[in-house]
Structure formats: C-alpha cells, structure tokens
Amino acid sequence: MELNGGGITKAAAVGCCSALAVLYVGILYFPSLVLRLPPPNSFKSFMIRRFLCVGVSSLLSVILCAFMLPIRSWDAIGFFRVYGIRFDHISQAVIFPLILTSFMYYGSFAAKLLSVIQAKNESFGATGSSLSASISVFFSKMVDGIVSGTSNILSWRNYVVAPLTEELVFRACMIPLLLCGGFNTYAVVFLCPLFFSLAHLNHLYEFYVQKNHSLPKACQLVGFQLGYTVIYGAYASFLFIRTGHISAPLVAHIFCNFMGLPVVISRKSGIITAAFILGFLGFVWMIFPLTEPSLYNHHTDSCNCWHKYCTWS
C-alpha cells in the first residue's frame, strides 16, 4: 500500500480550515457591510443573496484547497475525486448511508406510525375509514408537501444549498487538508466538526441582536445547536473518510434536515423509546459494514494523502 506524502504542516492545515470557516460565514455579511448594498426588499431576495454568497465562498474554498494540497494531476476527473465528487459507485454512496442514517430515526418513524393509527381510530367512528386509507392520506399529504416545497425558498436552503455548500466546504475541502496535514483519521473525525460549529457562531449575533433574545437565551439556543452540529459533523466526516464519496454525507445531511432531530423518548408510548433503542443498536452494529471502503471504491490498496479509506478497512 502506497501513501503519498502530505506536503503541508498541521498548523497550515488548521489555519486554512479556520480561514475557510470564517470565509463561509463572513461573506454572508459582505454585501451589506462592504459593498453597502441596500437591504433586500423581500425574504426571498434576502435568501437568494445568501445563496450567491455561499456559492462564491464554496468556489473560493475549492480553489484555495487545490493550491494547498499536493495535487500532481490536474485532469478533471482526478481533480474532482480529491473532493469526493464522483459518479462511480453512486448508488452505493446514496443508498447505504441513507439506510444507516435512518436507523437513528426509528423512534421518529414509530411516532409517525402511531400518529397515523391514532388519526385512523379517531376518524373510524365518524367515517368508517380503514387503516390503509389513513396511511394513503398520510403519504398523499407528504407527497403534496414535498411538491409544494419545491417553490419554497426555505426548502431550497434546507435541502439543496445548505447541504451542498456545507458538505463541499466542511467535508470535501477541510478533510483532505487535515489528512494531508498529518492528522490521523479519528482526530479528523472529531476535529473537523469544530470548524463546522465555528461557522454557526454567527447565529448568536442573529438571536441576540436581530431577534432580540436575551443573552442567556441566545447562548442556550446556540449552545444546543453547536452540540448537534458537532455530533452530526463527526458522523458526516466519518462517512466522507470511509467512503471517499461526497454523496454519502450529502444524502445524510439532506435526510437529517428533512427529518429534524430524532425522537428519542416519548411519554405517550414506550414503543417509541423501544424503537429508538432498536434503531440505535442497529446503527452501531451496521456503521462499519455499511461504510466498508471496498463498497465505494474499485481499489483500496493505494491512496493519496487526502483519501485515507485505504488505511481504515
């Protein structure tokens, strides 16, 4: 097994990752603070401006990362593979991480199923509707919600722009930098989320200044959010390193945004808690088999410094 040398120091890797995190957040305020552009006249215009800003910062991050990494081949396929942007093994990179992530939502699935059954029982006496009809109505409403979401600017943020740009910057750019800087895989898994959390500190300003929350309340909200982003960031970093495929953390990110926080416990029914525990045990049991590097790569015997799945079988 041949591993090419990194060519950058740990300090340079950390410094570059910090700069990318600051750039990702700081550019959001560039139009108003630097260019002195007038405030957008609608929420949609405000979000579109932000989409353009994070798009520019993501592109700049890719360029900066390319100059920092010891990339010897500049052909398009090889260049994009550095960032895990690949079309080979795409079905595995979408399906297996989705299955793995869904284990953590068994409690949520159980809660949804129980709500459907409860709604069926409540309506059965009045209309005589069957369980299958109730389930059909539930899925019909879900499909309608997805269709209507395509015209919702927040849906574009939550399910397209944010997952795509965050995974590109905080996983596809930062992880190769840290790996080539000499950090081992487990250190990267837990270090990378810290930069991801750093990019969410601007929410403290938004909660405290723009939304007029008290400082303790703003700190509480941001603290909870940072805790969640650290946990998710570690999981997404794990997926990226194990698979070498950006699609793996990307589909997990979109799915988590769609589902929200997992339902862990419920006072209404012990079934929900039992379902979560079952799902959690399944997640722990399958996390390594479903992310086996050989499932996502033709060869796992020779890697550059930015891909360490060769040493993590």
Image: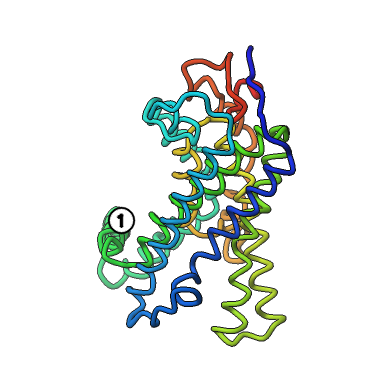
Answer left or right for 197 relative to 182: left
Question: Residue 290, position in %: x, y?
Answer: 54, 29
Q: Can residue 118 be seen?
A: yes
Looking at the image, how many numbered discs can be counted on the residues?
A: 1
Q: Which quadrant of the figure has residue 31?
A: bottom left
- Which quadrant of the rendered structure holds the C terminus? top right
Q: Secondary structure at mark 1?
A: helix
Question: Residue 77, position in %: x, y?
Answer: 39, 27
Q: Is residue 308 above or below residue 172?
A: above
Residue behind mark 1 = 139
Residue depicted at 67% across the width and 41% down the height: 189
The amino acid beneath tag 1 is Phe
Residue depicted at 50% across the width and 76% down the height: 33
Q: Is residue 177 above or below residue 208?
A: above
- Which quadrant of the rendered structure holds the N terminus? top right
Crowd rating for badge 1 (residues with CA inside 10 Å; few <14, some 14–19, many 20+): few
Question: Residue 153, position in %: x, y?
Answer: 33, 67
43, 253: nearer the viewer? 43
Question: Residue 110, position in %: x, y?
Answer: 50, 53
Q: Can residue 258 be seen?
A: no
Figure colour scheme: rainbow
Residue depicted at 52% across the width and 30% down the height: 244
Q: Is residue 259 above or below residue 189?
A: below
Answer left or right for 235 relative to 50: right
Residue depicted at 48% across the width and 50% down the height: 60
Answer left or right for 42 relative to 212: left
